Structure formats: structure tokens, C-alpha cells
Image (cartoon, coloured by chain):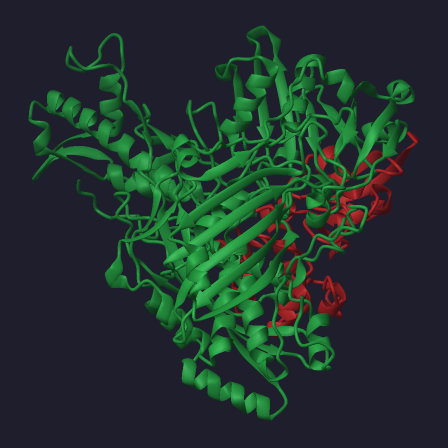
Chain colours: A green, B red
Amino acid sequence: MKSAERYVGRSVPRKEDERLLSGAGMFVADIVLPRMLHVAFVRSPVAHGRIKSIDTAQARRAPGVVEVLTGEDIRPFLKPVPGMQNRPPKRWREAVEHDINIPDQPILATGKVRYAGEALAVIAAETRYLAEDAAELIDVDIEPLQPVAGIDEALATTSSRVHDELKSNVVAKLTVRKGDAEAALASAPRKIRHVFYNHRYLAMPIECRGVVAQYEKHVDSMTVWSSTQVVHWVRREIAARLGLPEARVRCIAPDVGGGFGVKGHVYPEDVLISFLARRLGRPVKWTEDRYEHLLNSTHARDDRHDVEVGFDADGRITAIRDRFVKDSGAYTPVGVGAPSNTIAHMLGPYHVPNYEATATIVVTNKTPNAPYRGSGRPEGVFVTERLMDLVARELGLDPVEVRLRNMVPPEKMPYSVGIPYRDGVPVVYDGGDYPGALRKAVDALGGLAQIRERQREAWKQGRYLGLGVGCYVEGTGAGPFEGATVRIDPSGTVFVATGACAQGQGHQTVFAQVAADEWGVTPDNVSVSISDTGTIALGYGTIASRSAVNSSSAIRMASATLRRKVLALAGHILECSAEDLELRDGRVAVKGVPKLSLSLAEIAQAARPGWDGGRPSDMSAGLEVTEYFEPPTVTWAYASHAALVEIDVATGAPRILKYVVVHDAGVLINPRLADGQIIGGVCQGIGGGLLEEVVYDENAQLLTGSLMDYLIPSASEMPPVELVHLETPSPLNELGVKGLGEGGAIAPPVVIANAVCDALRPVGFEVFSTPVHRSKIIRALNGRSGSAS
Amino acid sequence: MSKQHTITVEINGVSGQYQVEARRLLSDFIREDLGLTGTHVGCEHGICGACTILFNGEAARSCIMFAVQADGARIQTIEGLSQSGEIGRLQALFAEKHALQCGFCTPAMLITAYDLLRAHASPSDAEIREGMSAALCRCTGYDGIIKAVTQAAKENAVAAPADAGQPHGSCSGKGRRA
């Protein structure tokens, strides 16, 4: 197919910007419907306790209150939200040793509360102010139980159980093996063993969550606007819980103010607000506030690794054995997703002949834990990349050199790792130059020799300068599928609908670029519908760095099928063979005879059913095709991050002088938007490495319940970031794209940790847990502690 | 609780009288009573800055003010600033430098930048970072935002206020963790 210009690969301006720049975006909180009610929740003040009574009498009589419901009230009508919203496929269940008993999550707590912030009662009132007034009048009597405040408490047999119906606080166990790690460790010339802890932090989009629901009785239909990344999941759960056909539930995510994973599954509020809208016969709105968000929306990370690595005198890794425990909080709505990722990504870009990883997932009385940008990958990468530095230290080698010796070289691509991925398919790295990326990253900081020279000079002057590197591979574009409907509108506009949901990625722009190339039109002539179950029947959503791969491929498939019909119909009208036609500038023209042509609008008119159509008798009416792309497995993006860090000896603060990302996500559809995704991810990773930390006390009470306590980076905290793109096209899809939404956030915590430890080699400081607190550094500088725990 | 107070406010150049409860947040008044939903609410405790408006010509957080405090005040929101064209070049630079992704913080970022550039004709890089740290963005890593504001400063894309005898406020006073 020919067109004047191709748009894939170009930094075309975003379609989204105009409305967002002028305050004309439409976020869930902006939606106003006639007679709309407003909701507030009563949430548990304790982490673990038995509900003795909830007295709602006074609240029911409060001004403006229309409804007050507790868990007991709704239990007969509303089943809990499933504990595993995305079940691993059969292939995975056959390939991975597993034992999974993940509990469901009640819509409102009944019997027990399992974390501070769990919803106990809901109030619907004429205004949010009145709903909150009434919430104050609800008297809750909870008998406190011993909280399970962390991993150790969860594993102790003497502890109380978070879920009484389960035998223990262990809700899942997964094991993956490659070779014989035990034997290889027993015979390894050298080995080291450490415990690493990845702390709990979270996505924190600037827009909190929110839901608006409207039930129309005359058609028995529900329309739900939710600030979500997965409209089709939300539709599925609402339909199932409310007993409606999916076709009568429409879920729309309008403009969404950031997601990063925390909006990547169904929450009890999605179901409950819809239930209220039907029960009360009025539209109902809930807008989460920031305190609720910190208490109640899912957190992430939070695992502890006991890991042993065997290696030879040259620093070549012979075996890694990791036993880790993940604190999932009270519920784990995305099941075993994040720990599965940890296992699948731990080996990184390295050839490791023997590997054994066991994940134990425990429940505690903390906020539920779910994927957040990177989802299990930052945890595994922190461990492996710290180990690389520690191995180098043991042998007196440079950490860069140890990595280069262990990396899979480009000539070994495609490289079969010997473990299954989360989709159950064996992991095969699909191309790239891992050592090349690392060398480029170090070179962008001045080259290894120069960096080491600078470092020695700094040390002489009593300053501490360090190099940190972090390398990873990232399975992206995961299945099971995404679909696209492509329709030639009567206006001639190419209409595209797909199940992807954007929260800032620029989907309306990039999918228009993909479709524009398919149809020989400009992106302005493409209208893209995302985040709306009303425009495509089946969808999966935007999680797991998957939409560029899956939706783009589906758009291409549907376009190809529809194009054949368009050309056949045009050939019929122009009385020539379809092979003699081409698409160009929004028209179908006879090759070499541009005057003999039809516009897409004319062809759409001819395809209409009914009187005065123009199609042959054996051709179906309409110009619309839906296709579903089912990727064979993931594509493998990879990157090397590197940073130069200097320690402020007065405060212990690590200052990042320069941060470099060398990244390969295959073909980039829109390079400027790709840069934005990567730098945005790096910023979150730097936050996670240095500033951000969810802190609980020993009673599992949240201590970081505001943005004054939970710090995310501001413009002042961001260092200069340099990006280097490599483009190794993926062989797994026609466009050659790989995903890149999450990558930037994976490496920064370990890059910072490695740089800090490298800078502080003269005082012998090693980091085994995140975040990298300046207090630990100051202690090390003052000679009070050789290593942080 | 429900006693109504009468306030007179000039919103985006149009003066009007409104009835509000004493406890009504200025951000709720702007968003719900006036329907100006370009002013966003991100934290309701004055940290994220998403609710930033111009209050008597200066950037202010509408989520930690009551509507009654606006009695007699002049308020400009993203809608008014967009219509007047005052921030037109700044908006164009935000698009050009990819200074927005989800767009939720964007109105506040634009107003923060506008306020910064009106007070400081030629801010240093550090002053730009410090000034822009008055609002939080979770998508961009601030890279495009800083580039857009830096370019806007270079171009003098924002005119100093007509009544600018002396710069109002200082950058450092507005930084989140100054």
C-alpha cells in the first residue's frame, strides 16, 4: 500500500493536548448528571478486628441522606470481587509449580475488618458534604484483633489469621526451576548469600480514583464512568455481580489522570456505586480523596528475598537461588501477577545456567497490594543488580565488567532462557544488544576509565562520587489479546475502536498514526475511540506495557481485512481489478491514473445496505471489521540505566549528577511520546529509590496518609536525564514494536543504590533494602555502620 | 451548617453574586457551582497544587481556601486564561515540548508557569525548577515542563502584569519544600 507519507516513527503532535491544555478535559470528577447523588464511606479505623456492630440509625436521619448500607445489608445482593481478576492461563498452571488460595474481597467488610481503611459502610446523600456529615454519625464497634503487621508476623504459626477461612496466611506459593541450583551452589567456587528487602511504595497518580454510575430502568442498562485502566474488566465484574448481561453494561474511562497500575483492576467501589445507582434509581458519584487513596487504593512492591548466588573466579554466575516472600496486604486483586514477574525477570540480560526461585505470597493487615509500573520487575532487578555489584566487590572486579561477562551476547539471539513466562510460554529473548546497551550507557557518562579517574580524584578530596548501573529485560505486550474495530465512516473518516485505555500515553495519537499508515490518510482523518466498552465488544485494557503492541497489531489486522473489501468494492464501481488500485491521500485510485479515483466517503456510501447501494450482490453490507490480535507471547524490551551520584557529606543526601537510559523497545511509533514515557518512569523510580515509602506502625496503622508524609518527586528533585534509543524490531509483530510504558521505573532504585555503594566504597557501605535513606548514609560516613540492612 | 453567605466574586472577568455555605471549599465552588472543571482537585490538603488558580493575580491553591474568602476577590481559572489568549504561547510550548501526558496537573502547571514568568522576567534554571515544584506531576518527570517554561522565559512569552510595580511573591516562597 502506498501513501504520501508514513506517520509511524514520527513525533506527530498529540490529539489529546488541545482539550487538556485549556481545561476542557473530562475526568470522572467533572461528570455531572441530573439528580446525581454523592457517596462517602466509613472506613475501618483499625487494621484487624471483629465487627461487633455498626449503628447507622442517626446517619439515616441526617439531612440529605438517601441511603446508608453496611456489609451485612448488601451481602445478600453483592458477591465479593474475585481475588484473582486475571487468572494465569492453563499453560502457566502446567509449567509452574503452584499452590494458590487467594481470597475474594468483600464489597464492604462483613464479620471482620482486614486493613485500616477497609470500607465498612456507604452513605449516599444529596451532596458530598452531607454524605460526609452523615458518615461522622455512624457508630462502629470493632473488637480489635492482633494485627498481622508484616512478613514475619504472617509466617509465624502463632499469629492470628487475616482470613479465618484459610489454613494460614500463605495464600500462594510458586516455584520455577532451571537446571539444578542446589547442586550448582554446592559446587560453586565462590558464593554469597544476602537478604534484600524491596519496600512498599505506590503509583500515586495525581487524579485519585472515581466512579459515576447511571442506571436506566427502561432498558435495564448501566452506564459507568470509572477512572480505570481496564474498562472491560470493570464491565465484566459489574455485569456478573449485578446479574446484567455484559451487553447492557457500558463502562467508559473518560480522561484519566494517570494510572501506572493502581487503576489496573476492578475495585469494590466500581461494583458498589453501580449497585447503588440501580437500587436508588438515581445517578451516583464517588470521588476518592487523597487520604482514601493512600489508605485504600492498592500499594505495591514489598517483598523480601533470601538469595544465594554461585560464581567462579572470573565472576561468571553459575547459579541463583532466590526464596522470597511477598506481603500482599489483606487482598491481592491481581493474584500472583507481580511475583510471577519477579521470577520471570530476575535473570535479566544474563546467562545463568542454574536457577531456582520460590515465591511465597502472604496476606497481612495492610492495604491490598497490586501491580504498579514495573510490577514485580523492579523487585527482582534490585536483587540481581545488587548481586552483580556484590560479586564484583568480592572479586575486586569492576561491576560493569562482571555484567559484560555474564550478558547474553547479540549473536546468541534469539536466546532461550529455560523458564516459563507468565503466559506459560517459554521465555525467549527476541533480539537486541545487551552488552552494547551497557557500554553506551557508561560511555554517555564519560566512559568507564574517565569515571573511575574522576572517582579517585573525588575520594582524594574527601568527596564521594559513584557510578551505578542497572540492566534489565522486560517482557512487554503480553496477551491474551486486544481487539480493534475499524470502520469507514460515511464521512470518509477512518474510525478505530480498541480496548486499550489511556491515562496519558497518547493512545488517540499513536493509534491514529498506525491507522493513518494503513489507509493512506493523515492522523487528522482518523477518529480513535478508546476506553469505552460501548465501541468494542471485547477488550483487555492498558496494563503490562501492552497497548502499543496489542492494539496497534489489531488495528493493522482489521485494516488489512477491511482494505481488501474497500478495494474490491472500488474495483467493482470503477470496473477494474482490485490489484490495479491503491490507497492514497484518502482516496482509492487506479494505479498510474490518479484521476480515476473514489473517496473513502463515496465507497462507504456504496457499501451501505438498502436502496441505491453500489456493492456487488455477493458482498456483505457496511465497511466495518473487528479483529483480535492474540500475541504468541511477549516481546522483550531491555535497557541499561546508569547514573553518576555524589553524596552530600553534610546531609548524606545522594545527588544524581546525571542519569542515562539506553533503551530498546523496538520500533517507536512516536519517539517524543516514547521519551516522555521513559523519563516519566525514571522519575517514579527515583522517587521510589529515594523519597517514597509507605510506612506502617507495629499495629499496621498507616503513618504516611498525606502528600506531606509520602513524598513524590517535584521538579527540583529530577536530575538531567539523557536517553539513547536503540531500535531492534521485534519479530513477534508486523510493526516490530515492543512495550515501553513501565520500563523507566524498573531500574532507578537499584541504580541509585549501586551508585551510593560505589561512592562509599572507602567506608564499605552496602545497601540491602530500599529506599536509600540518607540517615543510613550519614551513619556510614560517620563510621557507625558498615552496611545498611 | 447550612447558613448561606453572599459573596461577590469576579471570575474570569465577569463579576457575580453567589450564595455559599461558610464551609464550602473554593475549589468546590469553582468546579461545582460555576462549572469550571478545568481546576482540578488532587489532594485537598494543599500539596499537589492541581487546584491552582490566580487569586487577585497570584497563584493560589483553591482547595485550602473557603469560597467565602473569595468575597471581593478577582479569580482567574484555566478557562479564562485560555479564552483571553494570555497563556496561548505557553500552551503551544507545552504541546511542543510534550509537557503533558494525562493532563490532570496541566492547568495548574500552566498557571504556575504563568505566575512564575510574570514575577521573574528571566528566571535562572534553578528558579524555574524551584518555581515549578509548586505543583506535582506524576507523568512527565518534569522534563517537558521545564523545557517549555525555559523556552517561554527565553521568548518573553508571558507579559508582565500591567500593574507590576514590584514582583509579587518569590519563587522560593512557593516551592513545596522550600
Q: Position of residue A597 (x, y in %)?
A: 15, 31
Residue A670 place in picture, x, y as percent: 37, 51
- Note whether residue B41 is visible: no
Q: Hey, which quadrant is residue B149 in on the image?
A: bottom right
Quarter of the figure that contains the C terminus of chain A: bottom right
Q: Position of residue A220 (x, y in %)?
A: 57, 9
Q: Is residue A484 above or below residue A373?
A: above
Viewer-proximal residue among A206 and A50? A50
Q: Residue at x 17, y 40 (%)?
A: A1
A533 to the left or right of B21:
left
Q: Residue drawn 36% across and 71% down?
A: A405
* Res. A560 visible in picture: yes
Query: Between residues B34 and A386, which one lies in front from this camera angle?
Result: A386
Image height of A282 relative to A119, above or below: above
Please indicate whether residue B53 sits to the left or right of residue A501 in the image.
right
Task: Single out the residue that lies furthest toward the bottom.
Answer: A460
- For residue A440, side relative to residue A733 (left or right): right
